[in-house]
Structure formats: structure tokens, C-alpha cells
Amino acid sequence: AAAMFLRLLSDVRWRPAASRWSGAARCPRSTSAASEAPPPAPLPGQARVVVCGGGVVGASVAYHLAKLGWRDVVLLEQGRLAAGTTRFCAGIVSTARHVSIELKMADYSNKLYQQLEQETGVQTGYMKTGSISLAQTQDRLISLKRIASSLNVMGIPCEIITPKQVAQLHPLINIHDLVGAMYVPEDALVSSANVSLALATAASRNGVQIHERTSVSHVLIQKGRVTGVETDRGKIQCQYFVNCAGQWAYELGHSGDEPVSIPLHACEHFYLLTHPLKEPLASSIPTIVDPDGRIYIRNWQGGILSGGFEKNPKPLFTEGRNQLEIQNLQEDWDHFEPLLSSLLRRMPDLEALQIMQLVNCPESFTPDMRCIMGESPTVRGYFVLAGMNSAGISYGGGAGKYLAEWMVNGYPSENVWPLDLKRFGTLQSSRTFLRHRVMEVMPLMCDLKVPRWDFQTGRQLRTSPLYDRLDAQGARWMEKHGFERVKYFVPPGKDLLDLDQSKTFYKPDWFDIVGSEVKCCKEAVCVIDMSSFTKFEISSTGDQALESLQYLFSNDLDVPVGHVVHTGMLNEKGGYENDCSIARLSKRSFFMISPTDQQVHCWAWLKNRLPNDSNLTMEDVTWKYTALNLIGPRAVDVLSELSYAPITPEHFPSLFCKEMSVGYANGIRVMSITHTGEPGFMLYIPIEYALHVYNEVMNMGQKYGIRNAGYYALRSLRIEKFFAFWGQDLDAFTTPMECGREFQVKLDKGMQFVGQEALLEQKQNGVYKRFTMFILEDHDTDMDLWPWWGEPIFRNGRYVGKTTSSAYSYTLERHVCLGFVHHFDEKTGEELVVTTDFINQGEYEIDIAGQRFQAKAKLYPFSSLFTQRRRKDEVELSGYQRE
Amino acid sequence: FYLTPPQVNSILKANEYSFKVPEFDGKNVSSVLGFDSNQLPANAPIEDRRSAATCLQTRGMLLGVFDGHAGCACAQAVSERLFYYIAVSLLPHETLLEIENAVESGRALLPILQWHKHPNDYFSKEASKLYFNSLRTYWQELIDLNSGETTDVKEALINAFKRLDNDISLEAQVGDPNSFLNYLVLRVAFSGATACVAHVDGVDLHVANTGDSRAMLGVQEEDGSWSAVNLSYDHNAQNEREVERVKTEHPKSEEKSLVKQDRLLGLLMPFRAFGDVKFKWSIELQKRVVESGPDQLNDNEYTKFIPPNYHTPPYLTAEPEVIHHKLRPQDKFLVLATDGLWETMHRQDVARIVGEYLTGVHHQQPIAVGGYKVTLGQMHGLLTERRARISSVFEDQNAATHLIRHAVGNNEFGTVDHERLSKMLSLPEELARMYRDDITIIVVQFNSHVIGACQNEE
């Protein structure tokens, strides 16, 4: 294999660009004798930023930091530049991505690489070949059509083509088992090593110091801040450290004074290189992606390069870097056999083609198939960009740009929450968990992405004390941030489809089950276990808690004790960093409820902003309380039977919180909110009482027709009531003004708060996007594709935005989509202010996998859906789920 | 007509049986880990039998395969009775006395054997009293003969074999007032059976063989590869020593007629067997027994037929050849199988297939392309063939089943070919016997740790 490494390297036409390059990097690649190499340039004693990792990701971060004007940047590479995973990367730049932010990163990378050769003079091997993604099944074609819709509205040329057209674009393909394909003509091929070198060259010209053969042994951290790094060649003091160590990022994360948990794990990845065909393939031949066959095939020097994502991946380096495993990274033909069969099925004429090599190149994978970006929640100045899930080249450019923006400007120019390191906690850091999860994730790269699929590995980690009880009653589970949550309850005697068969883009098999749960919520009473919510207690000896929270939250928290306030936790631009409910337990203490996946992010946000005052304490009490949502018109009756405290609306109005006894159990925090707009209560129960309270509620509830319900029912209820959820509908780029929540902002609360200025400006000048509810008009629930999220919205035939969530409303008997409407100038494309009239005076269509459905836009929910009229400012508009 | 893989599996697995020697807290004192056994019929009904039992009054385990001919009666009787004869032969004098006293005074009898039987392996209820009486006579004689010497396993095995065959012969001559039993004992005596029995006690392995079934030891070499060691000699025309033995036992005038067409007297394939009184009794005795016997016997042409050139009986014996082997840590398993297996598979292949199956390791060298010119098509062919070899292993939970799958389904490349397997198994009853014989296999797995420890003690 060593010979092959050299071969690949000889393709790398790399020119030392500037004298800044240190030592070993300057000598010709082919020489291995150390004596010929001039002594390496000395390391600087200090720098602003130290980037660790000289692959495409590290080079891109350094390149963009330099572009943004940061000069004092040092890039360290333990071996040689572009010598790790990057060197063996297949070099396919593909924009066909499901997640919008990934699509944007890939698009940016493509445009960056295209002009890189011109910018740097380094040949990158960039070749615009286009790519064809094949569909062997109708479901796959639907999946491709959804991507095509996204690409088209992004302005990326893309079309769905017939098998015959595939044959015209690529002479070798067997099209007999195809139902269609997606052609993206601007996708490209590059030499990934050369791209990295080009980025490094440009970075170096802009002042980045690059040192090869320098490995970081330790990250120095003082008082929760990065202060420097120790390397095998000495110490560098720095303010920022960027971990771009790829598959070694996990280990490097644990080699600091404080561990930084970076949940990723390496798997072996194989691809095949062949000698040229008799008639060598044209260099412009499109790259083929055959997800049903689990393979990709690209042109490689007149022959082919083909690899894939097998069903039985081989994870490695579970216990860290291991020489034995590195040596064992050999060609494993038996393991590659299914992919080879798939290749020969797709291109039968290749039988006679001669093999050159089977390359084994480990790739790192993350627990949710998305890369890891951002600042550590515990160590300031410690940034991470790693875990590319074998799309390092496609994402490298864009991801490097966003991270550089993040470091320089405080936040990237796009919402990167789906990639944020803080979406994970230490719970995803177990090596066993990661090993098992990446074995599931790697095959998923090729699996069909259908709505509402759940990971199967690493489950039953965090559970409610009621887990077994609910499970025995037919609960079906999904997982959020490691916590098991009920989707719905399968009634006894009823069987659902197998997991595989239940994967559909159409009406799911649980439709009627959830329908009856919704009906029960509407007409009687249901219990939903919502224990996964993040719960913090913030208290102080004096007024510190109130003062700090008033500054950090946009609503007025100086309310009477026992009131619950819905409020955003906004950033300087007025965008939602978190959306929560805060109960004032006493003059000096507050109980804060946030979405499940906010546990790490919200904690870090508050920790970094609360004054360092020993009289002010914040505690994460998530694990201390079980949360039961008692939802429905009869909830008040059930609760009345279980407590002597008066529960009637006069004594217990909406948005109140009382500590009371339920059954024998005392100290239950009861709040008159349900996160759905339905009447009812949230019960926060100390966990040791959970089973008792649940049993009492279920027994007492019998005569009111109580039953269990799950999150799918909850979602249907909240969406038909136009409730936005953080993480799904709301993000750091959305302000309360843009989603009709001005009433949750108290601009005049008598003191300054974060985001106030931005909101004031919006109040004066208007908003540039508006959260809107769409009711699908001509959509047949039984026959048509269901909306999910990310569907393009068209107003009078022009693209205006995308949906963020959707659900079937059993009350309206229609699908409801929520999403944002923008106003793009017809000529310039410039974003204009969105007015109420603009929303109301349009004809809307929602594009589901290329098919457009008429939709009615609404800015306010149907008031008829609310059983109780409330004052407008009391309307409870908050919720925490992200589907 | 085509059998699906699940149908093939259900046929192959119908008779499979596994036994694991119970292990307590890792204190496994047995050198045997357990065994897998299975049978695939070609005759209807099958004429092969198998037995496995643990000796309770002495140490050791008994395992045997029995290949019947001219019906299954003799094989059935031997499979039920032989282990009792062996166990009794091994018992010390005091235990024999204790048992006899218990029977005499009507007290509960000490159990002698613990059987490990597949539900299809039956014992005849009707004959149990008769069989018991014969056995009791045997141990009474042993008590009377008390030599005071410790029992030698080899001798015990030989005595048990000879005694049982003698009893079968006597029971047929004496007859039984019960007409069913009378007919049964005659059928047992006039049919025949070979026997290949292993007795394992610690590191001492004895194999007693009568006929053409075979015992083979699977040995793992230091490099991990597998080799086979024979622990029995076939008693048939291919065994020159055996042919020689038969010839010395009869006058020179019969030399030419003794073995014809590789058969004893031109009729019988195995040169040693239980039953087969047609090759053991004098013509007069045969005639007398047949004539006085039930009508069914008289109607049977075979029983009335006297072998040609039948001058100096007996021509056949049940006396076994016994081989003693001291188990070594590299001896991983023992295969006992009837000739149905050995006709189709070479012992070296048997050793490899079972060895790879039991260790779960397939000593397939990883493929490296290196400097060779290999095309994608060639590589694909090679890989699918290797995959087929592996996947057939995972279908089976039983080493004997796995071996049968290979024996019946192997193609010229030594891999299981489903199409061939399907064809062989879907043959109609009347045709099956032309393409294959009954196959019975027992694979005994040894515990190398225990064997290693025993060796060190000695």
C-alpha cells in the first residue's frame, strides 16, 4: 500500500508558495531521507489562533480566517499537509444534500474550488463533470425529487431525468432496473489533496504560518479559556484553538486540561481504483451515485474510482490510536464484495477492467450523520470542525467559512445549529455508544431518508421512571438527546408494520392511532410524559437572579410569584438562542423549562453571560423532575380529584405555577400550560413520586376517559395552533417580531436586554421574513405525498421561502405547514420588508417533491380551535419539540 | 421441482441433535465439550442408527454409529443394547454385585447410562424385558468369573461386542413364546449392522469398530490448518489385512469364492457385522430356525436363501478392532460416520470443513491484488465463491448438519451448490438410494484445556 501512497502523492503538483512554509514541507515529496531536509522553521511563541490539522478542513479554516483579516494564525499538522483522510478522499464535490445548511456548504465549496486554481496558481484538478444520482425505486425517486426542489430554489441547476437520458449521459450504465435519476450538471471532481494545498498556499500568502510534522500533545486551558498548546516542538500561547484533527479529534479533545467531548468515531472506508478502460473514459463523464446499490463511481485517469457505504461497516480506533489497527488497514476484498457486485451490476462492461488497487481510507462519522462545528460549551476559545461523515471535500470549503465567521464575528452568517457541537452532550461521548452508533450511521449514508426515522442504536440511555409502565402499554419510542420519548401508543391487539415497511413518504401506518389520541386530547384528557425537557433553577440571595434574567430574556420576568412567562433568550441580533417558559417560584428563584436539546447550549449560553457571583446559582435539575402533561378539557377535573387545592380557572388561571400535593405526593410543581394551546397542566414531579402520581392520575382519570398519548399527537395539536418550536421553526436567525411574538417582548420593561436594539429597529423598519401558517387545499391525505419540512413555498409562482414543520390537523382535516415567507425583489433578488398585506395578498403553493399544492396562508391561528378565549397576551405560544 | 433454501434446511435439520456437557462454574472435568449428531435418510425407513450416552457408574462417554443392512432391525437392537453391554463390561466387581443384589431383592437399580437421544431415536418397549434378561445373564456370568483384575477398556469393548452378537444369535435360536417378539428376534438376527463406537474417558479415547463405518480424529496443526487421523480400519474388501484374515480362517479351497466383486461370498460389503446369521450359522441351523419360524420369515426369499459356496461357517464375526489413542491438545474433534459420508467425502476435507466450522475461523488467505493482473470480473467470481463457502457455515448450528450439507451439496469446487443440494434432497424415495446412502454423523468436540491439564498431571 505504501507504494500507492507515493503514487497518489506524485499526482499532487504542489509548489511551495512562500518562504513562510516551514522545514519539511519544502523538500521534494519523493525524498524520504531526513538529512536532506533543512531544519524546520522554529515555532512562534504565541499566536492568536492555532489550528490543529492540515487536511482540507483545517486548511479551509485557516484560509477563511486569513480572508477575514485575522493575521496571527498558525496551522499545525502532525504529518504532512493533506496526508490524512483528505489524501484518500474520493474528491467528489456533490451538492445533492438533504439538510439545507449542508447543501449551502457544498454549494459554497463548489464555487470556491472552481476559482481556487486561478486564485492560487495551484492546480486543483477541478473538473465540472456533473453527477447523476440513480433511483432504483419510486421511493428513492421521491427522495431525489425533494432534493431537486431544494437545489432548484437555491439556483443550483438540477433536473430529474429518465433512465434513457441517464444512458445518454453515461455510456456504461445498465439502466434496466432504474426508475429515474437526478442530474446535477455543476457537481465537480477535484484532487482533494491539491485543493487542501491550494487553500494552504493562499492562507500562507495571507500570513498563516504552516508547520508540518508538528503534533499537538496538549491543549492548555485556564479558567475555562484556551491559553495555549503544547506540541512536540514546543509551546505556543494562543487565544483560540481549532480542533480539525479529523478522526483524531476525539482523542485530541480529551488531551486538554479539561476534556472537550467531540463525539465521532472512525470507520474503514473502501474504494477501488482501476487501470484505464480500453477506450479511456472522457474526463467530463458524470459521477454516478447509486444509493440503492450503495456505491459511487467516478472517472479516475481514464479508469474508474468506485467506493461505497456497506451495510456492515468496520469501525476502528475505538480505543484510540492503535498502531496495530493502522497496520491492519489493508485491502479487504471479501468485505468489498457486495459493493463490487453492485458496481458490476450497474456497469456490466467493466468485468474485463483491470484492478489497480483497493484503497482503505478511514473516515470519521458522527452520531447523527452531520458534521461537528462550533465552540466547546465548557472551554471558551476552543473551536471544533470535524466529523465530516465522508463528505469532507464537499463541506470543507463552506464549513471552514462558517467556522471562521463564527470565530471572527461571533456567529456564522447562516444558522448552523444542526451542526453545532453543543447539540451533543457528554452522553454521546461513550466510545461504546459511538462505536455502535457509527455502525448504524455509515450504512444510513445510502439509506432512504424518510420522515420520522429513528436511530436504533444507543437507545434506552436516558429514560423516564415511567418508561417500563408506558412501554407495557404499547408505547413506541423515539429518541431526543439520548432521552426516550413516546411517539404514540399502539392499542392492544393492533399491530403496526415492520420498521422497514413503515418507511414511507405517504400516509403513515400510525395515522389513525395518533388521530384517536388527538381526539382524546380535544374531548377528554390525555397524559404525555415530557420528562426530557431541560430544566434549570436559577436563584440568588438578593435580586441578582431577577436582574440577570431581565437582561438575558426579552419578556418581563418581574412578575408576581407564581406566574409563568414565555420568553425568548435572544442574541444581539434579536434571534432566538432559546425559547423557554420561566416560572417565578419565589422573589429570588426561577424555574426555567427549555427544549430537550437545549441542555448543553442553554447552559453554556447562560454560564458565559451570568455574572460571576457566588450569591447567584444556576442548577441543572433536568434529572430531578418527571414531567407529565395533563392535556384536555377534563384535565382540570382529574387534578381536582387528586388535590384539595382549588384548580378552577378563577383560582388557577392560565400561565400559573403552584407547588401542591397530588395524591400522597407533595411538592409537585403544577403549571397551567400544555405547550399546545389546549387547556391542561404540566406536572413537574420529583422523580421518586413519578410512579405514584402517574398511577393516581390514571386511576382518577378513568371516569373522564383518560388515556396515554405521545409526541406525534402533541405535534399535530401545536402545529394546527400555529405554535413555533425552537430548533424546528425558530433559530438564532429568527426574531420574535418575525414570528408574531411581539407580545412576548417587553421593549419598555424599564431596563436593557440582549437583542433590544435589533428588535427596536425591526419594530420601526419592519421584518424581512414572516412566520406563516399554510393550510394545504388540494392535498389528498390518502393519496398524495405528505409534507415534511424544507418544502419550497411559492407565492404567485415565485419562490419566497421554505417550510419548517408540518403536520396533519385532525381538527381541520387538512395538512398544516409552517414556514417563513420572504419578499425578494423581482428584478434584483434583494430582500424587501414583508408586510401583512404582502402575506395576505398572494396565491400560495407548497412544492412537495416537485408537485405543487395550493395553500392558504394565515398569520393567526383559527380562533375556533381554542376552547377557551384568553387575553391576547396570555395566549400561550411556546413549545419545545423538534421533530 | 425445486426446493427453496428454507425447505432444504428443514430437511437437513430434521434429525439434528446437539448435546453440551454441562459445565459448572468453569469446573468442567470432562474432556468432551459436547457433540453434534445428525442423520439423512436415503433408505425408507432409514437403516442407520446412532447412540450416545454417559456412563454413570464408571467415567466416560460412549458414542456410536450403526449402519444396518437387510433392514434396520439389527441396527436398532445394537443401538439400544450395545452400550449396556459395554458399560457392564467396564463395571467393577462390587458394582456388579450391588446391581445384581438390587435386582434380586427388587430394589431400585442404579442407573448405568444416561442417554442423549434425539426424539426420533426410539427404544423398543416390547423387547426390553427380553433384552434385560440377556444382559442380566451376562453380568451374572461376569460376577462368577470375577478375575479380580481391573477392567481393561479394550478387552471390555471386545467382550461386549462379541457377547451381544452371541446373545442376538441365541435369542433367535431359542425363540420367544410371544409371536411379536419371536419375529423380532429373528429379524434382528437375520439382518445385520456394523458398529463404530467411541469411548472417551479423560485423555483415553478407544474406538471399537466392526464393519465399514469410520472414526476420524480432527487435528489442528500449529499453523492452524486441519488434518485427519484415522481411528478405525474399514472391514471390507479394500482392506488387504481384512481380506487376508478371512482367508486364513477358511480352507484354501475356498480362497477364490470367499471374496467376489469386493463382497464377502459375493454378497456382503462389510467383512464384520452384528447379526447376519446367514453368514454365521450352519446351513442346518438356518433351515431349522426358518422352518420353525413364523410364516413371514418363510415367505421371505432372502432369509431362505443360502449364500453360495457356504462350506465352513462362520464367515462373519462381530469382533471389533479396537484402537486406543491418547488425546492431545491439538486433537480438537472426533467424527464418527457411516460409509454414506465417506463415500462422498475425503477425510481431509471432512477435517477441514468441521475444523473451520467449529473454530468459526476460515483460513481463507486475505486476497491481495499485489502486482497481479486481475480484472473486476475475475475478482468478483473469486469473491462470490468465497462468500458462498462462508455463508453455508452460518446456516448451520450443528457441525454434523454442516457436514451433511457439504456431503450432499458439494460441487466440483468443494463449495455447497444449492441447486445440487436441492436436487439431491428432492429425489423420490425409490431413487434416493441410487444416488446416495444413509448418512449418520456424530461430531464430538474435545476440550483442549481439560486435555492439556490432564496431560500435565500425568
Image (spheres, grey):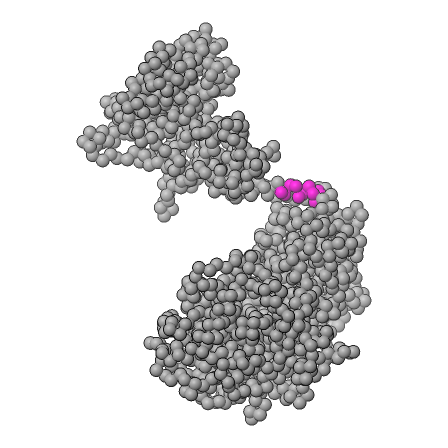
Inspect the magenta stretch and tell me whether residue B37 lies in it: no
Residue extending furthest left? B105
What residue do we see at 64% from left, 41% from top? B382
Q: Looking at the image, which is closer to me, A304 or B362?
A: A304
- Horizontal and vertical percent position of residue A535: 48, 76
> Can residue A596 be seen here?
no
Query: In which quadrant of the rendered view does residue A385 lie?
Result: bottom right
- Horizontal and vertical percent position of residue A632: 46, 76
Query: In which quadrant of the rendered view does residue B283 lie?
Result: top left
What residue do we see at 46% from left, 18% from top? B268
The residue segment tinted magenta is B374-384
Q: Which SS does the magenta portion mostly show?
A: helix
Decide: is B27 above or below B192: below
Q: Looking at the image, which is closer to me, B59 or A706?
A: A706
- Horizontal and vertical percent position of residue B165: 35, 21
Inspect the magenta stretch and tell me whether residue B375 lies in it: yes
Decide: is A343 above or below A697: above
Q: Split into 4 quadrants, where in the image is the C terminus of chain A?
A: bottom right
> Can residue B294 be seen here?
yes
Decide: is A572 above or below A12: below
Q: Looking at the image, which is closer to me, B127 or A345?
A: B127
